Amino acid sequence: MRIDVLTLFPEIFSGYLGQSVLKKAIDRGLVQVLLHNIRDWSHDKKHHKVDDRPFGGGPGMVLMAPPVVECVEAVQAQAEPGRLVMLTPQGRRLTQPIVEELARHQRLLLLCGRYEGFDERIRLILKPDEISIGDYVLNGGEVAAMVMIDAVIRLIPGVLGDEESSCLDSFSGPERLLDYPQYTRPRCYRGYEVPAVLLSGNHQAVRRWRLQEQRRLTAQRRADLLQHGLSSEQCEHIVETPADPPSASGQ
Ligand code: 6GU
């Protein structure tokens, strides 16, 4: 997969791109991340200005249409055109199904904004897929783009090792539930025992316990994820049915 990032702050990405999972994917040729500085498309040859005050007044600065539109067009023309994503708090909220959809593309272009926003003509001309990473405000789209890259690349075959397969993640699998609790050695810590079923060697019982824990946790913390619309009584029943709680004798 080729990912082009269009930003005013390409330096922000260098630490992240050198990090283990992504670095390995890049080194193995599974992912290519290319950074482009929108400022290079500024029409202002002296100060490389790319933002200006909003018409109608108000605080802050707005990203101007010409450098952004022309940067996107020039980068698109470098290879087979890819899916253009605009990182903006006004976009649809990023979820695992959207991540899965993005991961199927051969090429993504991630357009990061700063300041108070984009000139509306950028949207009207480029018709990007506008995506937000959640209901809070960031200073710019760069951190959101890194979140998106991180979530997408781990779905590319070969990026994760066998033992860290992404199909067992939270939000994946047929029910898209939260993950089940994990335990490792020691078997007892400060009075908290590892649930007996995990030591039983009964793989079917372990699978059953984990699914039950996933449903219980999801009903308790994120009932909104139980998309099949369980009633609050059904949720309560799930929450109050621990499969095999760890015993805490030392408390
Ligand atoms: Cl994509 N950008 C900004 N600036 N803030 C955000 C966001 C994106 N997603 C959530 N908040």
Image (cartoon, rainbow, N blue to C red):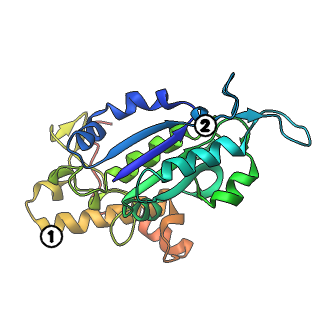
Mark 1 lies within 8 Å of ligand 1 (Cβ measured): no
Of badges 1 and 2, nearer the viewer stands 2
Q: Ligand 1 is found in which quarter of the picture?
A: top right
The answer to whether residue 149 is seen in the rendering is yes
Which amino acid lies under the numbered mark 2 shown in the image of this protein?
Trp
Residue 115 image position (x, y, % from top left): 70, 35
Going from the N terminus, do you reach mark 1 or mark 2 first? Answer: 2
The answer to whether residue 241 is seen in the rendering is no
Which quadrant holds residue 175? bottom left
Mark 2 lies within 8 Å of ligand 1 (Cβ measured): no
Which quadrant holds residue 207? bottom left
Identify residue for label 1.
204
> Disc 1 and disc 2: Cα gap in Å?
59 Å
Which quadrant holds residue 169? bottom left
- Residue 56 located left or right of residue 63: right
Name the mark on residue 41: 2
Question: Few, some or many C-alpha atoms within 10 Å of disc 1 (few <14, some 14-19, many ≥20)?
Answer: few
Helix, strand or loop status at disc 1: helix
Residue displayed at 68% across by 56% down: 123
Which amino acid lies under the numbered mark 1 shown in the image of this protein?
Gln
Residue displayed at 65% across by 34% down: 42
Q: Are marks 1 and 2 in contact (CB under 8 Å)?
A: no
Of 189 and 204, which appears nearest the observer? 204
Helix, strand or loop status at disc 2: helix
